[in-house]
Image: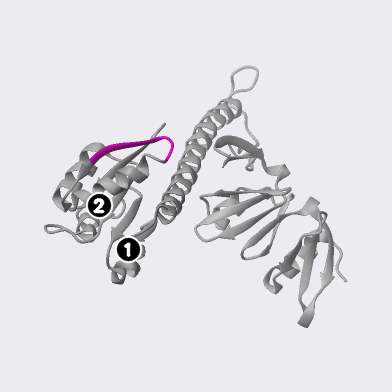
Amino acid sequence: MPIRVLVVDDEPIARRRVRRMLRLEPDVDVIDEVGSGNEAIAAIKKERPDLVLLDVQMPDVDGFGVVDALGAEEMPPTIFVTAFNEYAVRAFDVNAIDYLLKPYDPERFRSAFQRARSHMERVSSAEQGRKIRALLEQVIGEDRTSAALTDRGGAPQSNGIGVAPPRTRFLDRLMVKHDGRVFFVKVSDVDWFEASGNYVRVHVGKVSHLIRETMHHIEAQLDPSMFVRIHRAVIVNIDRIKELQPWFAGDYVVILRDGRQLKLSRTYREHLQSRMHRFA
């Protein structure tokens, strides 16, 4: 599917320049170009573009006014474009993907667009993953309910207290995107998880994938017999741990089977010790 782009700038020359650069990008469809903030608001509401290249200074409603009018949650991914660098901080305050300062060269434009492309791919992959997980959980939940309510004769099963509670299920697969392909990774194949801003980086062998999740949410879904948290930013597959080595000032490092060294936070040391049943 092509990336549907809306170009917003009150200068026709600037809009033509953006269009020329967008023609060099694969899978891009410029759905419209407008020259004012009010037109931008109407176009975004009507067309729902995947990406907006938005000029900051415009005569009626400026770029920030467009965001305010639509609301940050309804605003598509945005690259701000302006000739004045004093707007940079405010641009990122409203979650802009990037900020192009005029006059920018083709390489800078390409870098900004690639950042936007990567952002949209991550969000799309995470959203697809959430939808699939929700569907699977719904189907699994229905199967569990059916199995719990009926035995061979169709009578309700009981443990003496009430209906038998369903067995806890842990996350089995992750949906990730790599080299333009979306595929599943078995959780048991993951070496370790690493917090990365508002995302989590999943390390599998020599490859890593970025998914839109939080460490707290990931940890809550992992089998505690398989994974353990060793730092606020790191969760590791217990099977990948080779040894623990003392470090400076009473700290330790976790050595994985591939030689990777990960810091063990004192906060999680006792927890890991109880799990590993061995500590120097």
Instruction: Residue 158 in the image: state x and y as whole percent.
Output: 63, 32
Residue 209 appears left or right of 109: right
Instruction: Residue 80 in the image: state x and y as whole percent.
Output: 31, 57
Instruction: Residue 259 in the image: state x and y as whole percent.
Output: 81, 59
Residue 212: image tag = none
Q: Secondary structure at mark 1?
A: helix
The answer to whether any part of residue 254 appears in the image is yes
Instruction: Residue 190 in the image: state x and y as whole percent.
Output: 70, 47
Q: Secondary structure at mark 2?
A: helix
Q: Is residue 28 magenta?
A: yes
Does residue 98 lie above or below 24 as drawn?
Answer: below
Q: Which residues are magenta?
A: 25-32
Seen from the viewer's position, the closer of residues 94 and 132 is: 94
Seen from the viewer's position, the closer of residues 63 and 211 is: 63
Quarter holding residue 19: top left
Residue 1 appears left or right of 194: left
- The residue indicated by pointer 2 is 14
Q: Residue at x 84, y 69 (%)?
A: 245
Instruction: Estimate the spatial distance between the alpha carbons at disc 1 and disc 2, rounded to whole Å.
Output: 19 Å
Residue 91: image tag = 1
Does residue 247 lie above or below 3 as drawn?
Answer: below
